Every structure is written in structure tokens, then in C-alpha cells.
Amino acid sequence: MAEPLLSVRDLVVEFPTRRGTLRALDRVSFDIAEGEVLGMVGESGAGKSITGAAIIGLIEPPGRIAGGEIRLRGERVDNLRPEAMRRIRGRRIGMVFQDPLTSLNPLYTVAEQITETIRTHLSVSEKEARERAIALLDQVGIPAARRRIDDYPHHFSGGMRQRVVIALALAAEPELVIADEPTTALDVSVQAQIIDVMKEICASRGAAVMLITHDMGVIAETADRVAVLYAGRLAEIGPVRDVVQAAEHPYTSGLMGSIPTLTQTADRLTQIPGAMPRLNAIPTGCAFNPRCPKVFDRCRTERPEPQPRPGGRQVACHLYSAEAAAGATHG
Amino acid sequence: MAEPLIEVEGLSRYFDISKPWLNRVLEREGKSWLTAVSDVSFTINRGETFALVGESGSGKSTIAKMIVGLLEPSAGEIRFDGRPMTGTSGATMRSLRRRFQMIFQDPFASLNPRWHVGDIIAEPMRTFGMARGGETRREVGRLLDLVGLSAADAGRFPHEFSGGQRQRIAIARALSSRPEFIVCDEPTSALDVSVQAQILNLMRDLQDEFDLTYLFISHDLSVVRHMANRIGVLYLGRLAEVADGKRLFTEPRHPYSRMLLDAVPDLEMSGRRRKRVEGEIPNPIDPPSGCTFHPRCPLANDRCKREEPRPMDSGTGGAVACFAVEEGRG
Ligand SMILES: Nc1ncnc2c1ncn2[C@@H]1O[C@H](COP(=O)(O)OP(=O)(O)OP(=O)(O)O)[C@@H](O)[C@H]1O
Ligand SMILES: Nc1ncnc2c1ncn2[C@@H]1O[C@H](COP(=O)(O)OP(=O)(O)OP(=O)(O)O)[C@@H](O)[C@H]1O
Ligand code: SF4
Ligand SMILES: [Mg+2]
Ligand SMILES: [Mg+2]
């Protein structure tokens, strides 16, 4: 198999606090292949953003990577000096955040911001950079890009600004784009446009995408594979169609059943009882065990490790642990 | 059988967004107005859930606030159980006020952080003189129980609860004056899907138990489909379409309704291709002429640019404001 573009192994992120150390990510492992779109889902606080922040080296101190490693094309990037990491950010890994205003500087025109990014990372002339910027804006669907490029961010609507941010993230032709809730601040009708634009343009440039979102619908349509996080641990990862249509982890099944759809006929939505534990009160054994409809003794004492499943899927649940599968008494 | 509880007729709301007087004089500008809601009419029947959907800024919350009396209408009338709510005297208004409540989008901002949960829930009861002393405490315990919390939670503060639990507290509070009608403005938008399912199920159970009537506001069409008996689709402060709940999804009539439905991501992975939505919601300060949807509408013609369409009987038990539908072009 070809070497993955990004490889995350046993990643642990901790936040020291006065009342003890909080473990926000606990031995999370996954790969992203070249040109692939990996969706990342999970409840608020599950650790999605922290995973993205760890990859681009933006965990805010005193938070720190306390274990594991992150490799970009085989090369360790979790222990780089800030200067080296800055060169990777923007150049090799682009970022799109939820709020377009935080990524754009209100004091500079769109032209200034995009050409500056291009010239910081690529050796091209001012004129060439400007032409590239116009082409990019055009590609993300800014009408009359050549005229609008000299406008300031506040002259654009929310949807247009998010397109500008995508253009900015792609300006230096990165290999990986991390998009954290890129459409949550936008309108329903505009969300679909933005996701389409992002997917198309990344595909045309061969960039891989890590797409973080609450919205399973968006993931179902956009991602090749999806990773489900629960309380800082990976519950399930696999091809998006398999995971969405035939979830194996009890948490994923609950999550899928709780989403109302446009065609379902059931009167009541499936609901998962209770709430995700706080980081300082994660139960022993499987983190999901107090809420799990299929819980059994072993779940309360031993943490389930991700098990390879058919079709390239991995599931961290004792129902699928080797011994349980051999005994085949649950399900 | 359908007995109207809320009747909204010709409701409009304008906001004065002019610059300060001196600036206007210096810059020789007139007053400027934003039309948030324009000539909206609909009826909500007793025991049903009527939903309002539409993009951000389409006027959903403004309508909700006018209905519960948090905002004066600029024009039009709202009747509750046959009685006009505008221009009603204090005493009558007070007895009406007890009969409806509101639940807001943000469970973090809508509960007073310095009050015990028990006092938050009891507040509507106290305001309307409905319970005293030990009786209040018992009633609060019963309400907490009803929404899936426990009587012991009355002594805790809002910050000790998760988002979903806080929304349950807000619901318990809304129920405490035993209202008939509850306005729910995006009650689950701030919550995770798994928590959302808990709250939506709870709201439906309570509706059955207490014969509640809901005005349910959301921009999530899948949620609305799950909850609503009838749906009003708002565009730039105007009602584009009112339709029977399930019907809107099988037979959307207004081009904007169709566009909204086409934009919903497909969780079933049926292979349906989402259509790209053209354009963005225009500026409400300077709305397009004629049908305000015409710049984004695939069926627009010259008439749509000049004249404003009125809601007409859709032939499927609802109303549609669109010339293309009226002329049989859509
Ligand atoms: N600076 C910090 N100090 C302490 N804990 C933190 C800090 N930043 C994040 N956390 C904790 O780490 C956990 C994961 O946070 P993260 O932001 O990754 O969640 P998320 O999955 O992105 O959630 P959301 O959907 O709400 O964005 C949370 O429990 C959060 O409280
Ligand atoms: N107090 C106000 N002053 C000026 N303009 C206002 C005021 N309140 C609302 N508006 C404007 O009225 C329009 C309708 O706003 P409203 O809050 O009703 O929209 P909404 O449909 O609830 O949107 P959202 O989905 O974002 O909550 C918007 O253009 C808004 O900016
Ligand atoms: S390991 Fe046990 S508790 Fe955890 S998800 Fe699987 S069955 Fe449920
Ligand atoms: Mg996040
Ligand atoms: Mg609103």
C-alpha cells in the first residue's frame, strides 16, 4: 500500500489544569490518503477540533501533545520547532475555520491577503501571484473576481467570505486542507454551494481534506471515509457508505438513528440516553458503557481497542473484539 | 375540527436603521428602513405544530417575538383564541400572557445564571400568582421529573448542566404557567444531534399529554418535517408558501421551497444529486422589485420583476405566492 499522506498514531493531547490533567484525546490513530476526503464527526467536546489543531501544531499551551506521533508523508511533524511548523502551515496544510472573519484580516483587501500568501510560499512575481489569485477566486465562484479582488472582506456576504477563505487556504497549493465546521455559520442554501466548491477544487488539485463537522448529511455526501470520535477516543472509522448505512459501533448506530431525515416515517427518533461524559469523569473500560444498549461485563473494566473489520473498517467495541467474535454470544 | 388558536393577519414589522440625525443632515440622507416582516398572514390551529422555515434573516424570530408580545407589530393583527392581542388593555393582556410561553435557541443565554433552577422554573407561576410555598416546590419537582431531570436539581445552578439539560430546564419553565401555546425559536439548533433527538421526542410527548399548540421555528428542514403538521416558508420577510407538513416535501410548489429542499444533504445516499443553489439571500434594506425571489428564481419572467405576487390557494390545501405557479408555468 502507498504511504499515507497523513498518519496519526496513538495521539494523546492533554490539558493540565488546577484540578488535574484532562486528556482531550486518548490514543487516536487514523490515516488520510492522498486526495482523500476524511470526515470527522462526534458530539460537541468529542475532540474534533483538538485533533485538527494538533495536526497543524496549534494546540494552545499549557495544552500539549503528550504522546503518539503525526507524520506528513512519513516525516514527523508533531515535534517540529515553531518556525518549521509555520512553514508547513499554509504551504503544505491549508486551513478553513468556521468563522470566516477570524481567517481574514479586515484591514487588507482580498487581493493583498491572497497574493501575500502565495508569495510567502511560492516563488512567483507579484503580477503572477495576482493572476493566480484571480483564477482561484473565479474557481471558488466569486462572480467578477477581477473586479472584486480589490475589495475588503466586509464588502462580501458571509457565503462569499467563506469562499474567499477557501481560496486563501488553497493559495499555496497545500497537500492537505483541514476544514473545521466550514459551513456552520452559513445559511442552509449556501452551505451546499460551499461544500461543493471545496470538494471540487480540492479534487482538481489533488489535495486531501479533513472535514470536521456535526452534519452527517454533509459527511455522507462529501467524504470518502468517516471517523467517529467519542470522549476523545476513536469509536469507528471506515468507508462513509458502510458507516452511515450499517454502523457497527453502538454509539454510531445511536447517532445515525437520532438524525431526522427527509424520508423517514417513524414517529419517534432513536435517542441515546444520557450525555457524553466530561473529560474528568470518563468511565473505566469503554467510555460509552453507561449509555450503551449492548453493554456487558467486560465493557465496564477493559477499554476496547480498534479492531480491523471487513471492508477496511475499524471498530473499537468489545462486541467485535477477537474473543467475543469467536464466542459469538453477543449482538 | 380545525379550531384556530392563533390568527395572524397582514403582519409587518419595519426597523428604523437610519444613521443619527446629525449624520443624516450632514450627508443629506433620508431615513432608512429595513423590512423584516411584510404582510404575513397564517393561522395556527389548536393542538397542531405550525413551523416557520427560511434562511437566516428571513424574519422568523421577528414574527415569533411579535406573537409573544416582545415586539410591537408595525402593521397587522394577531388574535389569540379569537381576541386581538394588539391594543389590548393591561388586565386582559395579563390573562392572555399566561396562556403562552416561549423557548429560545440558546439554552446558555436564556436562563438567569444567578438563580437556582427551581426559582427559574417557578418564576412564571409566581408572576401569574398560580402557586404558593410548598405547593410551588412540589410543582417544580413534578415539572423537573416530567422533562427527565429530578426534583433535587431545583437547588442547582444552570452552569452545572449540559446544553441538553439546560434546554430541558427551559422547557420545564415554559410549562410552569400551564400554557396552551408555546413558541419554540430554534429550540435544538445549539444542540448535538443525539441531544436534539431527546428534546424533540420530549416536546412531542408533552404535546400529546397537554394538548399543546406549537409555533416551531427552525432552519433545519429534516427537523421541521419530523415535527410539523403545517409549514410556512419565509423568504425575505414574506410568506412564499404555506403547506401541509408532509406535502411540502413531496410536492413543493414555490420555486424557493423546491430550492431549499434540493439543498438538503442526503443522508440516505440514494444518489440524489443536490442541486446548486444560485445566489444568496438579498439585502432586506434594498429588496429586489416585484417578487423578491426573482433574481434567484429559475422561472422568473418580466412580470415577476414588476409585480409582487399575492398568496393564492395552492390547490393542495395551502397557499403559494408565485406567478409561475399561478400561470401554470411551474
Ligand atoms: N484550552 C483548553 N483547556 C482545557 N480543556 C480544553 C481546552 N481546549 C479544549 N478542551 C477540551 O477538549 C475537549 C475537546 O474539545 P474540542 O474543541 O476538540 O471539541 P470538538 O469535538 O471540536 O467540539 P465542538 O463540536 O463543540 O467544536 C473538550 O472537552 C474541551 O473542553
Ligand atoms: N432590532 C433590530 N433592528 C434592526 N434590524 C433588525 C432587528 N431585529 C431584526 N432585524 C433584521 O430583521 C431581519 C429579520 O431578522 P430575524 O431575526 O427575524 O431573522 P431570522 O429569520 O430569525 O434569522 P436567523 O435564522 O438568523 O435567526 C434581519 O435582516 C435582521 O437583521
Ligand atoms: S464496548 Fe461494550 S459498552 Fe462499549 S460500545 Fe461496545 S458493547 Fe457498548
Ligand atoms: Mg470544534
Ligand atoms: Mg432567528
Image: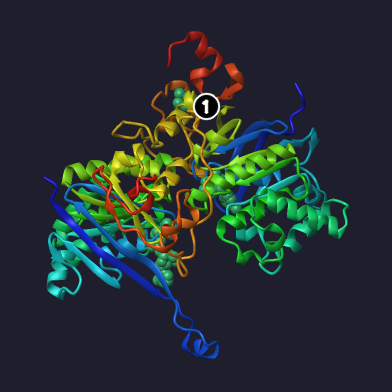
Question: In front here: B284 or A181?
Answer: B284
Q: Is mark 1 within 8 Å of ligand 3?
A: no
Q: How far across and how far down the image is residue B285, in percent? A: 46, 70
x%, y% of residue A154? 61, 66
Residue A69, x across and y down, in percent: 73, 36
In the image, taking residue A135 as reference, residue B203 lies left or right, namely left
Percent of width and height locating residue A277: 46, 41
Left or right side of A168 for A248: left
Q: Which residue is mark 1?
A: A243
- Residue found at x 20% / y 71%: B86
Residue displayed at 24% across by 59% down: B101
The answer to whether one can see residue A303 in this image is no
Residue B247 falls in image quadrant: top left
Q: Nearer the viewer, residue B219 or A7?
A: B219
Residue B302 shows up from this direction: yes
Which residue sits at x=26%, y=63%?
B67
- Left or right, B198 with respect to B305, comes to left
Image quarter where the C terminus of chain A lies is top left
Can you say whether A320 is above or below A162 in the image?
above
**Residue at figure coordinates x 72%, y 59% from the top left:** A146
- Give the image's coloring scheme: rainbow
The residue type indicated by label 1 comes to Val
Quadrant where the N terminus of chain A sits is top right
Reply above or below: B168 against B274.
below
Q: Is residue B37 above or below residue A188?
A: below
Secondary element at image label 1 = helix
Side of A157 where B106 appears, left or right: left
Q: Nearer the viewer, residue A214 or B263?
A: B263
